Structures are given as C-alpha cells and as structure tokens.
Image (cartoon, grey):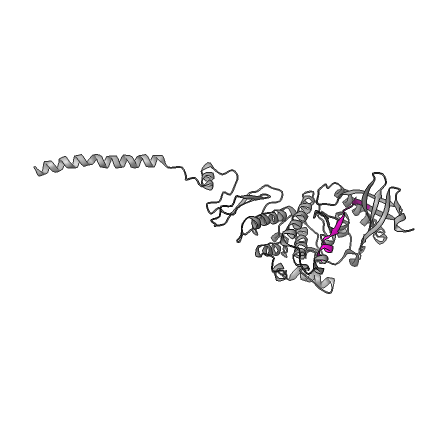
Amino acid sequence: MGDEQIVFNGRYRVIERIGSGGMSVVYRAQDLSLGRTVAVKVLHENLTDDEGFLRRFQQEAHSVANLSHPNIVTVHDIGQDNNRHYIVMEFVDGRTLKQLVRLQNQQSQPLSVSLALDLGIQICAGLGYAHRANLVHCDVKSQNILVTRDDRVKVADFGIARAMSEATQHTVDPQIWGTPHYFSPEQAAGLGATPASDVYAIGVVLFELLTGRLPFMADTHTALALKHMHEPPPRASEFNPLVPHQLDQILLKVMSKEPAARYRTGDQFGRILSAYRESSLQATGPISLLDVEIPAYEHTTAVYNRPQEVDVPAFSGGDIIIHPGDSRSAVSSSDDTGSNRGVEKGFPPDRDWVAIILGILAVAALLGLIPLWYFVFLAFSG
C-alpha cells in the first residue's frame, strides 16, 4: 500500500510524505471530518515498542495541545492506528530554518541582521509562552522551527522532544536522538533541560542565522558535547562582519556555560532582542543591555541612559524602558515622586521658599542698620 492510500483511523487521509527523521515520518494529510489540511507525524515503530516512552509522549502531547500561540505549531489530535502512533498538527506551508540557512549559503550571503532578529524574537515569543506554562522544549534547533511564506515562525516538536529527553539511555538509541549541535552544556553533560537550556539553543540558532554555520563543529558526538561544555563560543562577527558588537555580546551571554549567566526564559531573551532592535533603529552608538536581570514572570521596569544630545523619544522593549537621548537623571521606577518626574521632563526642582524669605529678611536687617551707623558717626564726630 502506497503512502497516498493510507487513512489513519478512517479520518486522516495521507496526501504525500513531506519529511522524515530519526524519530518519525511526517505526512501532509486531509482531515476528512473537518475538511482541512493537516500534518500527521507518525512515530517510528522502534520507539513505540517502549511503553514508558509512549506514555510520556502522550502526556507531553496532551500538554502541548493546550498551548495556543501564533509561534507554536498547534496540536490537533493524537491517536493510534494498529501499531502506528501519530500526532496530528496544523499544516505549515513553509520551510524549516535549516532549509532557509542552506538556501542563503548557496547564495553566498547570510540573512540580514534585521530578519535574523525578527525570527529570533518570534522564537523567543513561542518558547517563552511554553516556559510560562512550565513546558521546556529540550530540542530547539533550526530543523524544528518552521517559517511560513510571510516569515511567521512556528516552533514544532514539543511532545516528541520532551518525551525523548526523559527516556532512559537503555531504551533510546543516541543515533535516533540526533547530534547535539544545539545542546546546552548541561544537556551535553547528561543533566535535565530547563528554560535556560532552551535559551542557549535559541542563541545557537540565532548564531546560525547570522553566520550560516554553527558555533561548534566536531567529527563525533562526544567531541561536540565537550566543546559545548568547555570551549568558549566564537563571536558571530568573526564569520559575518555585519553583526554589530552589541549583538555579539548578547549571543555570548546566552551561550554562557552556566545556566545562571543566561537569560532564564524565552520571554526575557525576547525582551532583550526587542529592545536592542528598537535601539538600533532609533539611534546609533553603544548601549548595554547585557546586565539586565528581570525576575521570571514579574513586571519590572529598568531605565538606561546614554549621554547623547539627540532628543530621541523613549521606547518600550517589553518591560524594558530605554531613554536613548536623555542625559539627565534616570527614573528607576514608575512610582517615583513628583519632583523626580519634574527632573526627567526638564523642569527645575521646587525652590526652597523658606530659605529665600530668610535671606530677604537678613538683607533687610543689614540695610536697616545703615541709618543707625550714620547717627552714631554724627554723634562721635560732633
């Protein structure tokens, strides 16, 4: 029976195979009940023999099905047809970031910094939403990120990646799991993934978008893991001189070896990228965003100032407020006193009227002594 003749559970009729990998085969199919085009990802049978993995996969798929975000591939259904376990997702008419990078390499030109930033911010938005729902992707890579024809990002493969990451070493072949080109140092060391691990992987993806290559390359999985664990990452500008220094610094921070040195969630990283993009559009010159620490899921306002004569209106990058052209005192919170707000707007501080009145009285008293001194002078001179 050919692929085009397969109908899963009498509902999903396969149209064509559109992809395959170490864990699954992906089909474009027709949902006969709702009349829409969907993507059906069918797990390889060597994975479905493990009941523990299947249980974890179903749990994760149910969790991902509850996510509703424009930058996450929507999960419609999960099911089983004989020994074929599948997950039904929205069909994304586009290509993966890996395909986009390869196309740019063929044309011998990397993506523009502007487009790379836009794609990175969307990746952060999708993963940040999942992080708020206490979900970690565990396998963020350019192959798992789809881009539509209008440059909308869709992050895919939450359920499989999460279930796979929790599977035991005895039941999962490392060759199936894939090469750890995007793995964080802690994942390379065999530790569990956290939102900060996803942030590291986003940094690797953004590095790849900007340079057309990965930060670490090696002949074996072990050598690659050791590089992630111990070798400092290169600067993106070494391979693409158009990458600004500030963006170099941001990427080095998110690819730090220690999770605590990175931004902790996709939302935090996305706010930094958004603020950087806005600052680069509105003004030139150095701006430091690397030491911003925003507690997870708490609203905090931070203000930065650059001594510059150009009066550029303040802009908001998420919860970060930057005044590019303000060389006066910074206002560090939205509940400052009225006098501080006056200073920010360029108004002089309130005058101390008591001191002014006392000064006037003192001057008047001195002037009143002049006639007395005059009469004393006449008395002694007579």
Q: Which residue is most to the front?
A: 107
Expressed as whole percent of the image width and height from the top left, the position of residue 374 reads 15, 36
The region drawn magenta spans: 87-101
In depth, the one of 176 and 15 nearer the eye is 15
List x then y, in percent, for residue 6: 89, 47
Asked if residue 96 lies in the magenta stretch, the reply is yes
Q: Is residue 110 left or right of residue 21?
A: left
Residue 165 or residue 214, whichever sits in front: 214
Position of residue 41 measured from the top left corner of the image (x, y, whole percent): 81, 48
| Res 24 visible | no
Residue 120 highlighted magenta (yes or no) = no
Residue 279's x, y, as percent? Answer: 56, 49
Q: Please count the marks in the image.
A: 0
Instruction: Spot the residue most to the right.
Output: 1
- Judged left or right of residue 325, residue 271 is right
Quadrant into which the C terminus falls: top left
**Residue toward you, 15 or 40:** 15
- Which residue in the rendered view is the most extreme toward the left? 382
Can you see residue 376? yes
Task: Give the vertical position of 12 relative to 222 (above or below).
Answer: above
